[in-house]
Image (spheres, rainbow, N blue to C red):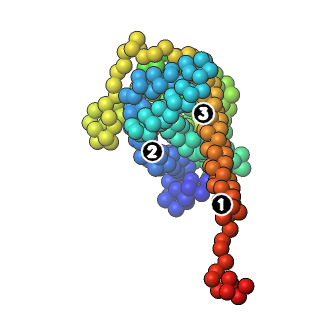
Amino acid sequence: MKILEALHLDVGLPWWGAIVAGTVFIRCLVFPLIVKSQRDAVKLNNHVPQITALTTRISEAKKAGNRLLFSQAVMDLEHYQKTHNVNPLRGLIVPFVQAPIFISFFFALRKMAECPVPSMQTGGLLWFTDLTVADPYYILPVMATVTMWIVMEVGMQSGPPNPNLELMKKMFRVMPVFFLPFIISFPTAIFTYWLTSNLFSIMQILLFRLPAARAFFHIPKSLEHNPQSLPAQEDFLKSIKEGWQNVQMAHQLDERKKYFKKQADSTHKGSLQQTFSQRTTQHPSKPSPQKRELG
């Protein structure tokens, strides 16, 4: 709210311009993180065959009940990821950063519309002059939904092909249309932000498709893998569940290994202390010559 008010009062932008400028400003601040996520995604894709083979080894050792092979496979996977600086969890950084921004913009604009801020009632543009009410022609909600669908569709096409994610892709394609009846009555101020953010995302995706831009941002070339050469994997949700179970089991094995090592060190230390005590008892120190003379 303070950023938007500063753009409106101090810079002198109309409210629709303040919302657009604020959105672009925040998205530009996050842009370096997007570039880094692009590098990490390509790097992870280029190592998919090796990582998939290692995760398959973990699953097979788990099904066989061989804890030694399971622990070794987990250590091999961790060593491979550390050596090549790849980590699948890095893909979650961008959503975790963008989610608070999206939520804060949403609540700030909704609160300003509910108050309402008087100047926002005439701070719109074209047919949506009042930013505190819903779009009477439903143009902005439809445009925001269409652009959201384009962002998801183009983004999924830009990513590496993965047959295990087909179900999730279908869900993402239906999601914008499913949410339209629930968001259609939101104030136009919110849709001004959503539409601007979606258009920025589309331009961002198209920018990363240009070879010159990818070379400028040092994004490596993405390798295409033959799906037949990759080990067979289970469906997406099941693989997530199994991956979480593997992490828990690996953690338990690591804790057990630390416990046994601590017990072994404690036992070894205790035996040394006992041996020293026995030697002291068996060979008491002789009295000094001075004490013998006095005696």
Check disc 2 and report its element: helix, strand or loop: helix
| Left or right, 71 with reference to 30 | right
Q: Which residue is mark 3?
A: 250
Decide: marks 1, 3 in contact (CB < 8 A)?
A: no
Q: Which residue is mark 1?
A: 279
Q: Residue furthest top?
A: 228
**Count of picture labels:** 3
Check disc 1 and report its element: helix, strand or loop: helix
| Viewer-closest of 4 and 158 | 158
| Viewer-closest of 84 and 123 | 84
| Viewer-closest of 246 and 188 | 246
Decide: marks 2, 1 in contact (CB < 8 A)?
A: no
Whether residue 103 is visible: no
* Residue 88 percent coordinates (x, y): 49, 33
Image quarter for residue 80? top left
Q: Which residue is mark 2?
A: 33
Q: Residue at x 55, y 18 (%)?
A: 60
Mark pair 2, 1: CA separation = 65 Å
Vertical placement of 218 versus 173: above or below?
below
* Pointer 3 local density, CA inside 10 Å: few below 14, some 14–19, many at least 20: many
Nearest to viewer (mark 2 / mark 1) = 1
* Pointer 1 local density, CA inside 10 Å: few below 14, some 14–19, many at least 20: few
Q: Earlier in the sequence, mark 2 or mark 1?
A: 2
Q: Earlier in the sequence, mark 2 or mark 3?
A: 2
| Left or right, 57 with reference to 32 | right
